[in-house]
Image (tube, rainbow, N blue to C red):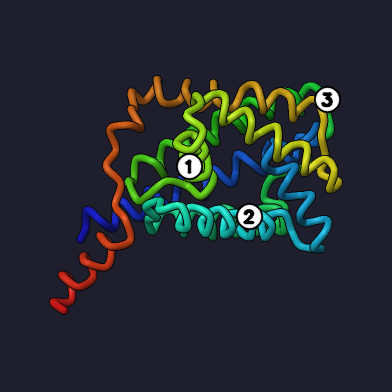
Amino acid sequence: MQKMMKRYFKLILGFFIFAIGIVITINANLGYAPWDVFHQGVGNILNIKIGTANILVGLIMIIVGVLNGKKIGIGSILNMLLIGAFINIIMSNNLIPIFLNTYIRLITIPIGMIIMGFGTFLYIDAGFGAGPRDSLMIILIEKTNKSVSFIRNAIEITVLVMGYLLGGPVGIGTVIISLGLGFAIEFVFKILKFDPKAVVHRGLNDEIEGVKSLFKI
């Protein structure tokens, strides 16, 4: 039980740190990451906060994953709910300043990406299931038999274009994040000597069986 609680703490901490990284890149005010351009675009159309749009899009991704037979873990659901909620909390309470100096804004973007890398490490290492958007990538790889880089780039370009058409903010920061986030995450994984392929994820059935065992149902 204590071991499981530590894993849940790592999972939730990972989501919070990831949300901090996202808000730092947003507050650099040089253009959002592709998915955040899309989230903001959805937010513009539905008149909701970007974090709420993040949750809504994540829910759709989970439904798509379930319909395609993907294993959904408690981490997938919490990813959908908590990252968006944390973004709303951080931004609503101005916990991270909006950066005005151009040089500082340029510096904060890679800092935000590195922080997202640490958040990614924590929530993947917890082993509670892939994130909703990761599931979409896996589905498309399986259906098209294309490479990871091709599918990832295709998804990023698609959501970027859709987000831009919906009024999401695009700028030099968008380009930097699009080209650099994968490298930033890989850099963090190398520092921590972390292999995400070695993580064995728990599904919802595992959590249900764990609860039954705990309460001897």
Residue 132 against residue 49 in the figure, above or below: above
Residue highlighted by disc 2: 57
Q: Pick the quarter of the image with the N terminus.
A: bottom left
| Residue 166 location (% of width, % of height) | 84, 48
Question: Do the numbered discs 1 and 3 sit on residues whose CB atoms are within 8 Å?
Answer: no
Amino acid at pointer 2: Val
| Residue 68 location (% of width, % of height) | 46, 52
Query: Residue at the spot x=82%, y=40% of the render?
Result: 164
Gap in Å between the C-alphas at discs 2 and 1?
16 Å
Residue highlighted by disc 1: 139
Residue highlighted by disc 3: 102
- Front-most of residues 147 and 75: 147
Q: Pick the quarter of the image with the C terminus.
A: bottom left
The mark that comes first in sequence, 2 or 1, is 2
Query: Residue at the spot x=75%, y=42% of the render?
Result: 37
SS at mark 2? helix
Query: Residue at the spot x=47%, y=45% of the render?
Result: 135
Q: Nearer the viewer, mark 2 or mark 3?
A: 2
| Residue 70 location (% of width, % of height) | 40, 51
